[in-house]
Image (cartoon, rainbow, N blue to C red):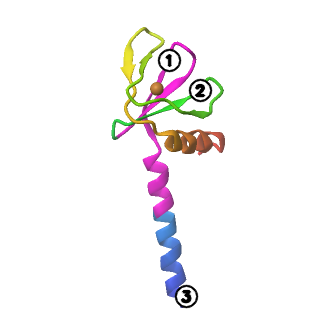
Amino acid sequence: MLKKIVVAAGAMIALSAFAAGHNQAERSVELKDGSTVHIFNDGKMGMEDQFGRAAYMEPGHTMETRDGKKITMNGNEVWRVDALVNENRLGG
Ligand SMILES: [Cu+2]
């Protein structure tokens, strides 16, 4: 009985560690309008607005970076950015 509980707890820790790693942005690029595009390790992107909140953007939308480069929105990973900004707020 006790062994089962220990195994379940171990699985939960492994799962949360995986979830945290999954939401890690590979690269974050500041845009001209003050928002940020987060590019995840699978190449999908998600937006963070000027106020540090996850924001919606249509996939295929063209964005301009602060240094004048063009980036095309790949995916719209609102929930991953949401997890990312919440982790940052908690200092994780
Ligand atoms: Cu975007």
- Would residue 22 be counted in the magenta stretch? yes
| Residue 50 figure quarter | top right
Q: Which of marks 3 and 1 is in front?
A: 1
In the image, what residue occupies the spot 52% across and 44% down? 79
What amino acid does circle 3 point to?
Leu
| 82 on left or right of 21 | right
Number of residues whose C-alpha sits closer than 10 Å to that of mark 3, classed few (under 14), some (14–19) or many (20 or more): few
Disc 1 Cβ-to-ligand 1 distance below 8 Å: yes
- In this figure, which residue is indicated by the disc labeled 1? 31
- In this figure, which residue is indicated by the disc labeled 3? 2
Spatial CA span between label 2 and label 1: 10 Å
In the image, what residue occupies the spot 66% across and 26% down? 51
Q: Are the residues tagged 3 and 1 within 8 Å (C-beta)?
A: no
Q: What element carries label 2?
A: loop
The percent coordinates of residue 71 (x first, y second) are 38, 20
| Residue 40 figure quarter | top left
Spatial CA span between label 3 and label 1: 52 Å
Specify start and end residues of the magenta stretch as a single range: 15-41
| 71 on left or right of 66 | left
- In this figure, which residue is indicated by the disc labeled 2? 49
Q: Which of marks 2 and 3 is in front?
A: 2
Number of residues whose C-alpha sits closer than 10 Å to that of mark 2, classed few (under 14), some (14–19) or many (20 or more): some
